């Protein structure tokens, strides 16, 4: 990549953010992921929605995590760019919601997808239900959580 090229922006959903954390400690858990896709993700500017951040922080309390683990997770999350909730995301959520009335998608996942659409970015997810949005988003990069979940 030349100095003038800006890396691709990818919006990472909560399922991916959680599993990618295990990549260094437990590489076998993600060994089934396509190496070319991982290279693409590694080269990109990876960002998260405020809804991913909220889900992660709620997870700390539900688990519950120790202070040390929360601090570690917060440092890890800071490596992702944080994309705000703005009028463009709101407009995309409305579009996606209207287009998916026949499907039950978790609301936070729809907000995360809307964030990707608003930024014209691919959505990286380990949630199979995001595949239903392929025709509505620039791209869905689906990385199954388990090798048998294709």
Image: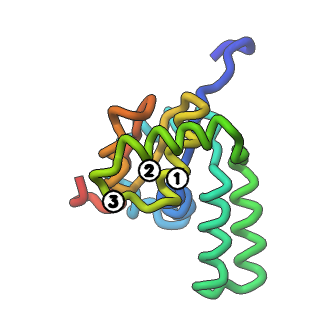
* Among the 4 quarters of the image, the one containing residue 69: bottom right
Alpha carbon separation for disc pair 1 and 2:
5 Å
Residue at image x 48%, y 56%?
A: 109
Q: Of the residues under marks 3 and 2, which one precedes in the sequence? A: 3
Alpha carbon separation for disc pair 1 and 3:
17 Å
Percent position of residue 25, x then y = 54, 66
Percent position of residue 93, x then y = 53, 44
Please give the residue where the numbered disc 3 appears in the rendered image: 104
Percent position of residue 36, x then y = 41, 34
State the residue in front, 47 or 99: 99
Residue at image x 76%, y 80%?
A: 68
Please state if 137 lies on the left or on the right of 57 as rendered.
Answer: left
Residue 33 visible in the shown view: no
Q: Is residue 26 above or below residue 8?
A: below
Q: Of the residues under marks 1 and 3, which one precedes in the sequence? A: 1
Indicate the colouring scheme. rainbow
Q: Which mark is residue 79?
A: none
Please give the residue where the numbered disc 1 appears in the rendered image: 13
Q: Is residue 20 above or below residue 47?
A: below
* Among the 4 quarters of the image, the one containing residue 136: top left
Q: Which mark is residue 125?
A: 2
């Amino acid at each position: 990549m030349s100095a003038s090229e800006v890396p691709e922006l990818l919006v990472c959903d909560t399922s991916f953010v959680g599993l990618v954390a295990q990549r260094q400690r437990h590489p076998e858990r993600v060994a089934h992921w396509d190496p070319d896709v991982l290279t693409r993700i590694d080269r990109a500017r990876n960002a998260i929605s405020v809804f991913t951040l909220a889900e992660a922080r709620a997870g700390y309390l539900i688990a519950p995590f120790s202070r040390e683990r929360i601090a570690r997770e917060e440092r890890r999350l800071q490596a992702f760019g944080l994309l705000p909730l703005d009028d463009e995301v709101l407009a995309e959520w409305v579009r996606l919601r209207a287009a998916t009335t026949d499907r039950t998608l978790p609301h936070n996942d729809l907000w995360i997808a809307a964030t990707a659409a608003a930024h014209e970015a691919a959505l990286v997810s380990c949630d199979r239900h995001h595949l239903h949005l392929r025709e509505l988003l620039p791209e869905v990069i689906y990385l199954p959580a388990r090798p048998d979940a294709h």
